[in-house]
Image (tube, rainbow, N blue to C red):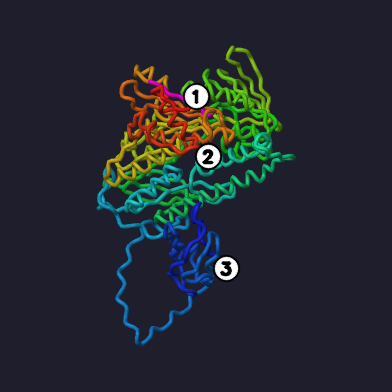
Amino acid sequence: MAAIEVKVPQLSESVSEATLIQWKKQAGEAVKRDEILVELETDKVTLEVPSPADGVLAKIVQPDGATVHADEVIAVVDTEGKASAAPAPSAAAPKPAPAPAAKPAPAPAAASVSTYGSAPASAPATTGGAPASAQADFDVIVIGSGPGGYIAAIRAAQLGKSVACIEEWKDPAGKPRLGGTCLNVGCIPSKALLASSEHFEQARHGLAEHGVQVKGVTLDLAQMIKRKAAIVDKFTGGVEFLFRKNKVTWIKGHGKLKGRRADGVIEVEANEGGAAKPYTARNVIVATGSKARHLPNVPVDNRIVADNEGALSFDSVPKKLAVIGAGVIGLELGSVWRRLGSEVTILEALPTFLGAVDESIAREAAKQFAKQGLTIHLGVNIGEVSTTAKGVSIAYKDKTGADQKLDADRLIVSIGRVPNTDDLGLDAVGLATDARGFIPVDDQCRTSTPGIYAIGDVVRGPMLAHKAEDEGVMVAEVIDGQKPHIDYNCIPWVIYTEPEIAWVGKTEAQLKAEGRAYRTGQFPMSANGRALGLGRPEGFVKMIADASTDELLGVHIISANASDLIAEGVAALEFKAASEDIGIISHPHPSLSEVMREAALAVQKRALNM
């Protein structure tokens, strides 16, 4: 007997148990891979558990009505077993009505395809893509399963489309993973390490003032990395659960455009391990994300010279760490390793620090980072980078033109990201990237080829996960015939340092360049009771409003929890609120959010606690 355990899938962050509603198969019956075995129900959703392989349902461990938990074994499938004979029907049993003819499967059967439930029936004709009358495997195929891709797939499925998502990502152990860069080696693991490193620094230096004396604090880096990996595993498994819940087909492999038929149907190929399989769709959404930009002639081995991926998995804390690039990634990863004990030096080619940030915020950030021990050199010109088995040496000219050299144990290269369009087959459907490598699209992410859309990091605009998510929802709704819209001025930015930096809307410099009259209001965290109680008095909130209409034009924050506080500013800008609107809204006391209200009142010089 070759037994495979059937386990309860990861449910969600907040749900740990489910009720087993009904077995669709009985012990001894033959089962096919991905055939639904049982339904589970939580207080939030109903989900289906498929068979992991062809075989026989050898054993049912938990009966109907049982309460089960994530990762609990509920059945066993024997891949070498034979089905038992079906029992003869009772003489008194009524003869069942003939079953309707089965509909053809939405995609060719293949070992590399995980189809979670049957696909919904085709929706009415979509806008831009092939008509519903055209024969295709799917209404929508999404290439890429990062935040933009998986959200696009889920939203399209919610709207009744048959959807597949092609993803080639594999973890270091070779296991296929959903979630793209963000969930696997980007947003999620980096924030996990930022939190862990902050706890370590607090235990060493920040608890004494609270009357908590801690001695002999040591770092278990392996456990820290293990925790990060567990969070990634949970989150990527959560996306897989969402695909099952929404009946999105996961096609494993590299997705590539192959052509567009006369009837408008798009031909796509998925290649896994050299085996190419064809699929067709009425609409295709390209969501292949971006990859780290590397220095020319400086190989990244992710041991001595690392990009963001390698810098999340160092096996030891470097005594001296060099970082090239003082942007979001450089500051966040530099902060992680500084807290864990590295002497960090950041080299930045631009003459100004955080040039996209409001100038007053950037000045405060530079002051705070210097106090923490981050050394940042601006206006440098990187020369030769040489590596050995033990370290790296960087030759550069400083802002005065003088020759300098920086020796370090490791180097993180964080000089931006480039769109990931490698071997995508754009030319096969009449598309090409622009001079910067982006796929040209209109305001609703349509390419010049009908039925093909592109979202996220492969198109214009900020390379932000939440921007990609918004575009994924928008495109799914455009395909459905709706008329959604994104105001890109209302997409927030966050840098997860300590203090955090967040902003939305216009900076003072941008408004001056536009010649628009404005007023500002600013309020410090040091005058907020909650911030003082937390021991986080650094920073402030700044609001910018139109001088005549009081419409809120920009919100800029440097403080603890700025990533959460900025959401109020986003809502205000989206609904064209005035600064007065925030000023008259009650905010809980004591809370950090009170500083939002005080900054809004300060626009009209009405701050109450300053």
Q: Amino acid at mark 1?
A: Ile
Q: Is residue 186 left or right of residue 251?
A: right
**Residue 499 found in image quarter:** top right
* Dot placed on the residue nearer the N-terminal end, 2 or 3: 3
Question: Which residues lie in the magenta part?
Answer: 519-525
Q: CA distance from mark 2 to mark 3?
A: 38 Å
Residue 115 visible at all:
no
**Residue 113 found in image quarter:** bottom left
- Residue 484 lies in the magenta stretch: no
Task: Return the residue at label 3.
Answer: 2
Q: Classify mark 1: residues with Cα within 10 Å, few (<14), some (14-19) or many (20+).
A: many
Position of residue 25 relative to residue 356, above or below, is: below
Q: Secondary structure at mark 3?
A: loop
Q: CA distance from mark 1 to mark 2?
A: 25 Å
Q: Amino acid at mark 2?
A: Gly
Q: Secondary structure at mark 1?
A: helix
Task: Return the residue at label 1.
Answer: 361
Q: Classify mark 2: residues with Cα within 10 Å, few (<14), some (14-19) or many (20+).
A: some
Q: Position of residue 124 (x, y in %)?
A: 25, 52
Q: Position of residue 490 (x, y in %)?
A: 38, 33
Label placed on residue 186? 2
